[in-house]
Image: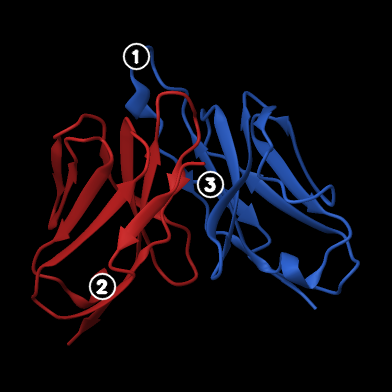
Chain colours: A blue, B red
Amino acid sequence: DAGVIQSPRHEVTEMGQEVTLRCKPISGHDYLFWYRQTMMRGLELLIYFNNNVPIDDSGMPEDRFSAKMPNASFSTLKIQPSEPRDSAVYFCASSVLPGQGAWGSNEQFFGPGTRLTVL
Amino acid sequence: GQQLNQSPQSMFIQEGEDVSMNCTSSSIFNTWLWYKQDPGEGPVLLIALYKAGELTSNGRLTAQFGITRKDSFLNISASIPSDVGIYFCAGRDNYGQNFVFGPGTRLSVLP
């Protein structure tokens, strides 16, 4: 398996522009997570999906952020309009559905990340 | 909310030395994960722990799930230059699917 795939790897945009980040999870994984990583705040969970349905979006910072998962193999994270403080590395991760009673079988596997710079 | 603390925040060691780092929580967790992140890359899973007291090894790495369920430890034996990176712990309780991540321990290995 190719692992979690993210695109683009780097994105530089100007304030006010729309940014769309893309993620392809590992085939067969039922959970998909979007994280943001900054020096100041570390890794922050933004939102996660189970079977393409958003389960917890309490980490999404503002209404400018939105995420979709139209099918099991694709998810997007959109920022509109973007601001300089959105500059960060955005990671996508996926995991399998834990088996019955097997709470430990859902380790998350991370993609390489998208480094976003908003000027 | 749940918070994880990692110590030390950073460490400089000589190649060949052993390394110890830990992760503590204010809450009880039922799963602990340890990740390593290289510059410009995503975190890579090193070790997963599922039971209190569990001791698990992966090559030169050994991790333990604390008896209190509020801490975990990672040891690296005979460090080598490629061990350089940031080590993150992550914990999950019985009620959530998502993990809480610690702030990381930055390891530097001097030749």
Q: Identify whether B10 is placed above or below B89.
A: below
Q: Look at the numbered disc 1 and give the secondary structure of its residue.
A: loop
Q: Identify whether A61 is placed above or below B9.
A: above
Q: Look at the numbered disc 2 and give the secondary structure of its residue.
A: helix
Q: Which residue is mark 3?
A: A4
Q: Which mark is residue A101?
A: 1
- Judged left or right of residue A41, residue B79 is left
> What amino acid is found at the position of numbered circle 3 in the picture?
Val
Crowd tier of the residue under label 3, counting other residues whose Cα lies within 10 Å: few below 14, some 14–19, many 20 or above: many
> What residue sits 84% from the left and 47% below the top?
A63
* Camera-nearest residue between B8 and A66: B8
Residue B10 percent location from the top left of the image: 31, 74
> What amino acid is found at the position of numbered circle 2 in the picture?
Ser
Residue B11 occupies which quadrant of the picture?
bottom left
Calculate the distance from the C-alpha at mark 1 to the C-alpha at mark 3: 26 Å
> What residue sits 34% from the left and 14% below the top?
A101
Q: Is residue B107 visible?
A: no
Q: Which residue is mark 2?
A: B82
* Camera-nearest residue between B31 and A90: B31
* Camera-nearest residue between A30 and B72: B72
Q: Is residue A42 visible?
A: yes
